[in-house]
Image (cartoon, helix red, strand yellow):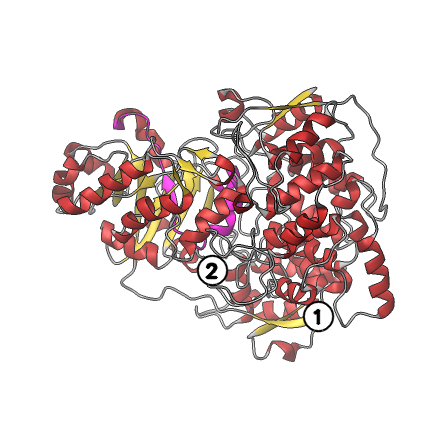
Amino acid sequence: MSKIMLLSVAIQFAVLSPEGSAETVSVATSELLTPPVRHGLSRSEKREPLLIAQCLGLPDAAFAAETDARVDADSVSAYIMSCRKPNGAFGPIDQEYTDAAWNYPAVHALRLLNVDIPEPDQILTNGLAYPAGHAGYGHWLVYHQAMTRWLLSSDPKATNQSIQRARGPVRLKHQGYEIRYYGSPFGTDGDHFFMTDGRSAARQFREAAELGYYNLSSLFYLLSALEADGRDVSNPDQLVQFVLDRQAPNGGFVDVRTADGKPTDHDTHIAHTFHAVASLRLLKKAVPHADRCVRFAKHCQVMEFSKQAPFPGTGGFRFAPDDDRQGNYQDVYYTYAALQVLKLLHAEPRAATDCRNWLLSLQNHDGGFGDRPDWRSRLYSTYYALHSLSLLGPFDGESEEAKESASTTRLESVRSFSDIAGTRLFGIPQRVIPSRRVAVPRVPELTDSSLKIYQGLFKTPLVTLNDLDGLSRRGFNLLAMKTDDFSTATLVQKSDDHTDNPLSIVLCPEAYPHRLRRSGGAVLHHVGNFTLDPRWTESQRDIWRAADTAGREGLVWSDYRQRVLKPLQQLGSLCYPEQDFEYEFALSAYDDGLYGRFGYNAIQVGFNWSPRDFVRVFPWRERYTDKLPPISDADAHGDLKKWSPQLDHTRHLYIARGGSYADFQEAARNGRVVCVVTGVEGVAASVSYYGRPEAIRFVKERVNEWKWWRDDQ
């Protein structure tokens, strides 16, 4: 067995809790490399550090300090393989499911590493799925499915492989400028948004003679998926014009989302620029004003400390050069997009060495890469980092011969789709990731004996005093009703005196009339859910009313933050959207909340509607589930009698010294909220956990104290 396979087995062995359920990798590896605090270690637990040391080829003494670990390209492969599940497909290391959104980055990363993937048929059988229910980002789904098939069927050593045209061309039709609840290439009616699944999507895609797109990103995903599937488009000239109409004067591209909108420099985005440039390449058209486009991409790189930067370090890329753009932070996704643009236009970053060092700083002790320094490893961030490092080429310590070989590969003209996918970069990561030691962070433990586990759920039906006993017996300590009617304050006063199981009632309206205007003129809805405290004074309630009124004005993001989110968060409200709509919108909105700049300060994870787990609907939410409070949302559309069974699909647990709303707020501020989702497709254990590792560990160790569902449900 290879070193990679041995290390993968060791990591998989370590991430299983005594009950056999998956723990997060940061928990598991810290247990592995730092002295466990619980008493009575089993023999297997005592030998785990030695096993890892042996798999890495390190002397036993290397783990004596237990504060760092050696990483290299092989440890990246081991991390990825440790995310492979018993069904042969890939998924998040701390979850059971194996959806397409996690298999594509795993397979692409392993191809870049030139690692053989055993039993690829298992991935095709079990790794292209999507749970039945809400569609999410449908264009990304078909991209993941088609690209995974192509990567598994292609010879990774064939750098300019010709794809056979097995079927006729497909017409791509613009779906209009209305911002819809979800995105689907198959249509815009409700069934395509709310009644979908991975298998039907894959079948429809392969049989379609016409598909729909609505913006630059969805067009790129369809063009790539069709190319991977061996099909052409029948209307390339129309698509080329759609892209060209979105180039701003500075050379970057804007995701214009209105019929009469014009691209402006202020709205340019590096991800949309990549999608535009790559789409033009796939359509065999040159990029106009390429010199300006290169300049825009180059100036997205952070060259010196910025007041916008929430963390030190330079070398990575933001989505735009401007300091005044909200949510504009260094990220591996933006870095990948910028390097792709520069490669496609035969240019180099302003500071390649700084960029390489920034990317290497993302590698963690488990071998994977995070989205930013000190963020946990994920499959998608690992893929982005590997592809980015490959685009940069060898590091300074590489031999001149290897540098020449990689440089030739990297700078040859782009001739085909396979170049955009990076097939001629296969094997480069093995040469560009140096062997070195990185710190192993200690995972804190919740040792305060006064902490207990309480249960909450937001956007529930309205309840009355007569409902409180029954809801309390069902384990609830905090309910946020889907209303902004402050007359329920009388309920709160009475419920606080409840003796058997304290139950607090607050409000959480969904502000349906709110509209949020984003770059390119996109007007988003379903963007405002807010917790409101019935104990507020009349002047505090007026702050909510003013914020609610402002939210109806169709504010741009900067104004929505200042006039809606900021005043409510200063009152202690949690603010989160139901819909993200698109990757690029989501990152800037959550990042501003994460870094204290009054973006969203919570994230909806559990949801009553199928598929109930909204990380699987919007896979990018995975990056925030240990950073923002993960919320369970019942999204009630009826009274309690009708909605009662819907209260058992998901709940958020908060670890606190009491069950009140104030206790919940304190727990949310300090990372002690865990979202639990039950009965979801693709999860044999019937339950998924999201939150910080120490909080997840705390609730798992005490599952019998709070478990609300029956295993036979």
The front one of 6 and 624 is: 624
Q: Is residue 631 magenta?
A: yes
Highlighted range, magenta: 615-640
Residue 675 relative to residue 573: left or right: right
Quarter of the image for residue 289 reads top right
Residue 26 relative to residue 503: left or right: right
Residue type, numbered disc 1: Ser
The front one of 134 and 222 is: 222
Instruction: Return the residue at label 2.
Output: 308
Disc 1 element = loop
Instruction: Return the residue at label 1.
Output: 435
Residue type, numbered disc 2: Gln
Q: Residues within 10 Å of mark 1 (few under 14, many from 20)?
A: few
Disc 2 element = loop
Rendered residue at 84%/31% (across/down): 164
The outermost residue toward the front is 249
Is residue 536 in view? no
Q: Is residue 43 above or below residue 117?
A: below
Task: Give percent across and percent down for residue 46.
Answer: 56, 70
Quarter of the image for residue 89 reads top right
Rendered residue at 34%/39% (across/down): 529
Q: Are marks 2 and 1 in contact (CB under 8 Å)?
A: no
Task: Give percent across and percent down for residue 708.
Answer: 34, 41
Q: Earlier in the sequence, mark 2 or mark 1?
A: 2
Rendered residue at 39%/37% (across/down): 527
Task: Give percent across and percent down for residue 575.
Answer: 34, 45
Quadrant assignment for the N terminus = bottom right
* Labels 2, 1: front one: 2
The front one of 468 and 352 is: 352
